[in-house]
Image (spheres, helix red, strand yellow):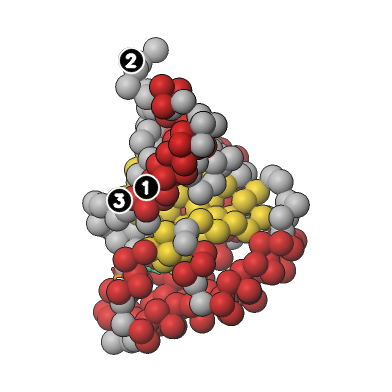
Amino acid sequence: MTLPFQSLEKIPRHVAIIMDGNGRWAQERGLARIEGHKEGAQSVRAVLRAAKQAGIEYLTVYAFSTENWKRPKLEVDGLMKLLVSSLDAYEQELHDNQIRLRIMGQFERLPLPVRMRLQKTIDATADYADRTFIVALSYGSRTEIADAAKRIAEKVEAGELKAKDIDEQTVSDHLYLPDVPDPELMIRTSGELRLSNFLLWQLSYSEFHITDTYWPDFREEEFFHALEAYNSRDRRYGGVRK
Ligand code: FPP
């Protein structure tokens, strides 16, 4: 699908998405929840294509939170399996479009076959520099910030850093992906008005776009509307309108 992305004045460098509503999408159709996740995986693919078309450099999707481990084993296993099969399906497209795959989260908590499959694509795409697809997996923002605090404290203890020199940049530098710029736009589907422990530090100044659409129904056109809405915002970072 070709959409008029070139008509937009501003294109964010980084868009982050909370993909919500897969379960409800499936329930409303009398289907198992995993069917909603499967259809959601198709939306990931559609949005990845649209983001490339729009010229977005970084796309981050929240695929599995630290809290999601509490879901029934059947659903967790199904999601892990889906992740692997989606990677098989996307891999060629990542190469064709020179998109680098990165993961943020507790990588070591993922099952070994999933880690191995992810690592293969992470390594194979590591040299692509212009576009990055980030999948947040077993991710929780409070854990990320606590881990950063721990590593900063260790450096202070080791005499590598002085407590008086710790500033915002020091914290940013110790998050999972310190080289990735903060998202200018965060999209959440299915109408929920919550951050759900997603990028709490990085989204401090981001614009939020919340849509009632369930994630499996969120495709290229919806993504374009989100970018249009972003274009109509006036970002001031706490300053005044010029
Ligand atoms: C939230 O919907 C969605 C998830 C927890 C999983 C998202 C995962 C995918 C779309 C799978 C594919 C991902 C990639 C990166 C290939 P929910 O289950 O919380 O929905 P509900 O709130 O309606 O129950």
- Cα distance, mark 3 to mark 1? 17 Å
Please, what is the three-letter code of the amino acid marked with disc 2? Val
Task: Give the residue pinned by disc 2.
Answer: 240
**Residue 37 x/y as whole percent:** 42, 75
Please, what is the three-letter code of the amino acid marked with disc 3? Leu
Q: Is residue 227 visible?
A: no
Quadrant position of ligand 1:
bottom left
Q: Which label number is shown at residue 146?
A: 1
Please, what is the three-letter code of the amino acid marked with disc 1? Ala
**Residue at 56% from the left image edge and 65% from the top image edge:** 45
Instruction: Specify which label sits upstream in the sequence, 2 or 3.
Output: 3
Check the picture and name the quadrant holding the C terminus: top left
- Cα distance, mark 1 to mark 2? 33 Å
Instruction: Specify which label sits upstream in the sequence, 1 or 2.
Output: 1
Under 8 Å from ligand 1: the CB of mark 1?
no
> Along the line of sight, which residue is nearer the eye, 237 or 39?
237
**Residue at 27% from the left image edge and 81% from the top image edge:** 27
**Residue 195 x/y as whole percent:** 30, 51
Badge 2 crowding class, 10 Å Cα cut-off, few under 14, some 14 to 19, many 20 or more, is few
Badge 1 crowding class, 10 Å Cα cut-off, few under 14, some 14 to 19, many 20 or more, is few
Instruction: Specify which label sits upstream in the sequence, 3 or 1.
Output: 1
Task: Give the residue pinned by disc 3.
Answer: 195
